[in-house]
Image: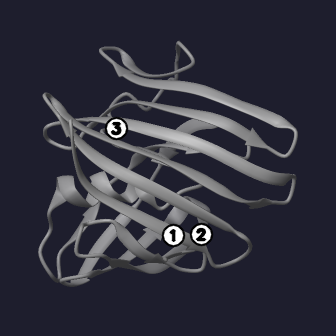
Amino acid sequence: MTAVASMLWRRLDGSGHDAAILVSGASGWILQGTAVFAHEAGGACLSYRVDLDGEWRSRAGAIEGFVGTRTISHAIAREANGWSLNGKIVDGIGHLLDLDYSFTPATNFQQLQRIGIGAGAAAEIPAAWFNLEDESLTELPQRYERQSDRQYAYKAPSLAFETDLVIAPNGFVSLYPPYWEGA
């Protein structure tokens, strides 16, 4: 395995940092990192991983750590019959190719690598979204519109959220306002 890229972020809306690394393997990529930040429930420390195939599609993921006094431990997999969370199939999301975690900007990386859209183009890229607040895995509709070489307009309509993402030369999101900024 060979390290390809890494990124460090600092939290913009409170205390915290996140660090991630992308490594290449024999059959794809591994994205892993750790986010440590202030949460309304107390301190949060979450280690995460996403296993990707050679075409940047998510195969599996894992999240371990804590938020306040709540322990977090989840295994996520894209199986032949759909996505599973801790071994149980989640209905209605089997068609999704990307795994996205609500608490880190790292998981936008593989989506942008996979779609490869040019300036002025847009793409709808729904993801299997792990929501930290209720520890669920659901479909998150997303839209990316490439505005320039390093900038995308991002929308998640079901969350009533939109922002402009700035991409670092290594492909990671370097600015994800109002939450994260590359350090």
Q: Residue furthest front?
A: 2
Name the kind of residue labelled 2 in the image.
Ala
Mark 1 crowd level (few <14, some 14–19, many ≥20, 10 Å Cα) = many
Q: Name the residue under label 2.
A: 160
Mark 3 crowd level (few <14, some 14–19, many ≥20, 10 Å Cα) = some
Is 81 situated above or below 180? Answer: above
Q: Name the residue under label 1.
A: 9
Name the kind of residue labelled 3 in the image.
Leu
> Where in the figure is residue 147, as x and y percent of width and height?
25, 85
Mark closest to the chain's N terminus, 2 or 1: 1
| Residue 73 figure quarter | top right
> Where in the figure is residue 134, as x and y percent of width and height?
73, 40
- Which circle, 3 or 1, is nearer the viewer? 1
In this view of the protein, which residue sits in the foreground, 68 or 133?
A: 68
Q: What element carries label 1?
A: strand
Side of 141 where 71 appears, left or right: right
Tell whether label 3 touches label 2 (CB within 8 Å). Answer: no
Q: Name the residue under label 3.
A: 96
Q: Residue at position x 17%, y 75% from top? A: 121
Side of 160 where 93 appears, left or right: left
| Residue 6 figure quarter | bottom left
Q: What element carries label 2?
A: loop
Is 131 situated above or below 154? Answer: above
* Distance of label 2 from label 3 (alpha carbons): 21 Å
Mark 2 crowd level (few <14, some 14–19, many ≥20, 10 Å Cα) = few
Q: Residue at position x 46%, y 66% from top? A: 8
Name the kind of residue labelled 1 in the image.
Trp
In this view of the protein, which residue sits in the foreground, 77 or 23?
A: 23
